[in-house]
Image (cartoon, rainbow, N blue to C red):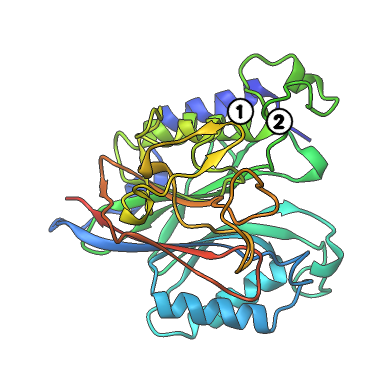
Amino acid sequence: MRRPIAAVATAVALLLTTPLAANASVTPSAAQSDRKIRMLDFNFAGNGFNKGSTGAPVDDAVAKISEQKPEIIGLNEMCYTQWVALRDRLKAKPGYEGLSEQVVVTNYKIPNCYDPVVNPDGWYVMGLLSKHPSQRVMFGDTPYLDLGYHYRERYRKLVCGDVAVPDAAVVRACVTHTEVPLVIINETSFPNNPDITKDPFYGRSINYAQAKLIADTITPMARRMPVALLGDLNELPFLPSLDLFYAKCDGRGVFDEVDGEDPRWRGNIRRWVLGIEDCPHRQGEWTMGADGLPDDYNRPYQSNRKIDFIFVDHRHFKVDAGSGWVISTPHSDHRIVVGEVTLRH
């Protein structure tokens, strides 16, 4: 069940005021300098799309990850059997022998995920993989942040790891997957849940509420260390919940998205029924849909759309015109997002 807001607030406050053991045990190199760091995010769609298969979908993902050579990897929507298979096969690839993981359960008793040995409880999971050693970030006494509002019994979470990037700083990499938004223009569309209707802290949808909790949690972290957020945010880049992350285009956040400097979006502005975003820094190549569908945000569920992101804080990272790109795969209804950014000294 949903953790009370007071408990979440207490956990976040403890996290922000108490030094983490991870920071003490993972020490950056003394000879720090600007360096490129590559990240990858992928919604694997392991249940509905891939029916729990640990064969071709896993092999394809491993091949594409190893080809792109990311140091930090965020993964969503995987049966735990698929996670184990991908992790172990990736470890066999050059450069990934020392792979570290931070994985959390997001749902239970998924029939396609059941395996009597590897996954007897039918876990559905998401998490972080890294080429380098990582330490799990604790939120109070919990190794993840519960985002609340378990609509349709989906346990949305934020999991973070402090990744010891060689010859650079420790990077706090976080992975999340927020809920599909309710109809934003209709504030009466909430489920029959008094926590939503009576709670003034949260916004107009479950998605907005979860995004706000994430932003309130990770934004202060970026004052003292590099922070990256990877995941499926289930929201178009120029809509209200993403205001909480973007530093540009009337955003209130401290992050840049890896595709935000791509010159393809200058003059190629999407329009949608809820408004017009005329800033190219909040666009980006589509990440969900299918080849051949229109890129028409007036029809968000009959077109291609960008809902998967890699955000990096602008104090510690630099994004340029070539920092973000996507890769298609036949084994998911999402595309793979890749970002290569400069980690400042």
Residue 73, given in percent of the width and then of the height, sits at: 47, 63
Residue 49, given in percent of the width and then of the height, sits at: 74, 68
Q: Is residue 220 above or below residue 47?
A: above
Quarter holding the N terminus is: top right
Residue at (36, 47) in percent of width and height? 267
Give me the C-alpha separation between circle 2 and circle 1.
Answer: 7 Å
* Residue type indicated by callout 2: Arg
Q: Quadrant of residue 264?
A: bottom left
Q: Which residue is mark 2?
A: 3
Q: Which residue is mark 1?
A: 8
The local secondary structure at tag 1 comes to: helix
Q: Is residue 195 above or below residue 305?
A: above
Whether tag 2 and tag 1 are in contact, CB under 8 A, the answer is yes
Q: Nearer the viewer, residue 26 or 3?
A: 3
| Crowdedness near tag 2: few (<14), some (14–19) or many (≥20) residues, C-alpha within 10 Å | few
* Residue type indicated by callout 1: Val
Label located before the other in sequence (2 or 1) = 2
Residue at (37, 80) in percent of width and height? 95
